[in-house]
Structures are given as C-alpha cells and as structure tokens.
Image: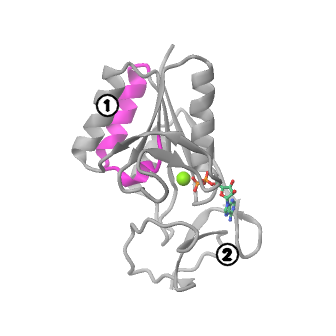
C-alpha cells in the first residue's frame, strides 16, 4: 500500500491528541505495525506516554527536539518496519522533520502528524504550516471558545489570568492554567 501524510491541526483543547490516538488505535486493530512519537519537551503528564486532556493515554517513543531526534524518528521507523507512525506536538521539532516525514510517506509509511496551527500570538507554527501544504489529508479541529462557546481556532495564553503580551516567549508548555481555547474575536494579544 502507498504511504500517506495526514496532518491533524487546530488550537489547544481541539482534540488533536485524542484524534491521533484514535487513528493509531484503528490502524493497530487493522493489524498494521504502528507507533507513536512525542517530543521530549512535552512532559506535562507523562514521560513515556502521550496523554490527552481528557485522560486518554498511549505509550510513545519520547524524542529530543533536535536534528538527531528527527533522524531517530526516521531510523526507528525503518528499523522496526513501522507501517504507521503518529507524531504528537509536531510543531516542537526542527524544520527538518518536514522532509523526514514527507520521505517516509514517499517510502510507503502512513504518517499522521498532529500539531498546533498557531502560536499564542496567532502566528503560524512553521513546521505545521509546511506539513499542511504537503499533506494528503488535513483534519482541522476546533475547540470551544471559553468566552462565547463558538468554535475556537486560537490558543490564548494567560499570565495570572490576563492575556499574555506579544513579547512573552513562544514556547511555554502548559495546560489549563496557562492556556485557553478562543475564537478569532476573543483571542487577545496585548
Ligand atoms: P489537544 O491535543 O488538541 O490539546 P486533547 O485531545 O488533549 O486536545 O483534549 C481534548 C479534550 O479537552 C476534549 O475532549 C475536552 O474534554 C477537553 N477540553 C477542555 N477545554 C476544552 C475547550 N475549551 N474546548 C474543547 N474541549 C476542551
Ligand atoms: Mg495535544
């Protein structure tokens, strides 16, 4: 069977991790050899498992977010002959992951990459953007805006309950205490 590059994207709390685990699980039921990878940076809930905000969890390879980490994903996939791989929080890896995943798909692997669409300022994450334009299928998920309940496409960063200013650092791993899902209208960057 031919390879395939699928990208799951959207803001925080959109259900990206849940959807990724669900798709990997389906492939395992179909007796495909599958694996999950996650960046070492994202240890919010577990060191060696991917855990969704609703508690759903799955065992994963934890990979450093550098060039060697990207090579490792390719090497493990080839060495173990994985037919399906899922990568969560793909935006935390260097740009070289785009070519690596694109190649793996060319070589017959079903690649499912899950990542944030936009950072807290509303700017695209370059890795996700580059994967989206190369994708064979895109799953664009929305969360629920915490202010108005409409579909949320943005991730609001909060510091002491107030919108984080534009000059705060882009990467700040956190959960419900520092981020909220917001729609375009209610997303604020002072
Ligand atoms: P993601 O990986 O996109 O951050 P997860 O799959 O980890 O999302 O978690 C999705 C879950 O988050 C939902 O099923 C729901 O239980 C919970 N959740 C918390 N806040 C929200 C919100 N504002 N909108 C939608 N779901 C939310
Ligand atoms: Mg997630």
Predominant secondary structure, magenta span: helix
* Magenta residues, start to end: 87-108
Q: CA distance from mark 2 to mark 1?
A: 40 Å
Q: Residue shown at 52%/86% (left/top)?
A: 160
**What residue does disc 2 label?**
185
Secondary element at tag 1: helix
Of the four image quadrants, the one with ligand 1 is bottom right
Give the answer, above or below, for where 184 lies relative to 89: below
Pointer 2 residue Cβ closer than 8 Å to ligand 1: no
Give the answer, above or below, for where 128 lies relative to 77: below
Question: Does residue 152 appear anywhere in the picture?
Answer: yes
Question: Which quarter of the figure has residue 8?
Answer: top right
Q: Nearer the viewer, residue 98 or 162?
A: 162
Question: Does residue 138 appear anywhere in the picture?
Answer: no
Which comes before the other along the chain, label 2 or label 1? 1
**What residue does disc 1 label?**
74
Q: Position of residue 113 (x, y in %)?
A: 48, 41
9 sits to left or right of 142: left
């Amino acid at each position: 069977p031919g390879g395939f590059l699928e990208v799951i994207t959207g803001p925080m709390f959109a259900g990206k991790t849940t959807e990724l685990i669900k798709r990997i699980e389906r492939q395992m039921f179909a007796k495909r050899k599958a694996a999950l990878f996650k960046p070492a940076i994202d240890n919010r809930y577990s060191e060696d498992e991917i855990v969704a905000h609703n508690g759903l969890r799955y065992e994963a390879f934890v990979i450093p977010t550098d060039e060697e980490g990207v090579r490792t994903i390719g090497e493990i996939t080839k060495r173990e002959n994985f037919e399906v791989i899922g990568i969560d929080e793909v935006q935390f890896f260097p740009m070289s992951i785009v070519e690596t995943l694109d190649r793996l798909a060319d070589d017959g692997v079903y690649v499912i990459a899950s990542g944030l669409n936009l950072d807290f300022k509303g700017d695209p994450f370059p890795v996700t953007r580059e994967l989206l334009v190369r994708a064979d299928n895109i799953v664009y998920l929305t969360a629920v805006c915490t202010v108005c309940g409409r579909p949320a496409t943005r991730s609001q960063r909060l510091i002491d309950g107030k919108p984080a200013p534009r000059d705060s650092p882009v990467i700040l791993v956190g959960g419900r205490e520092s981020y909220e899902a917001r729609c375009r209208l209610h997303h604020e960057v002072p």
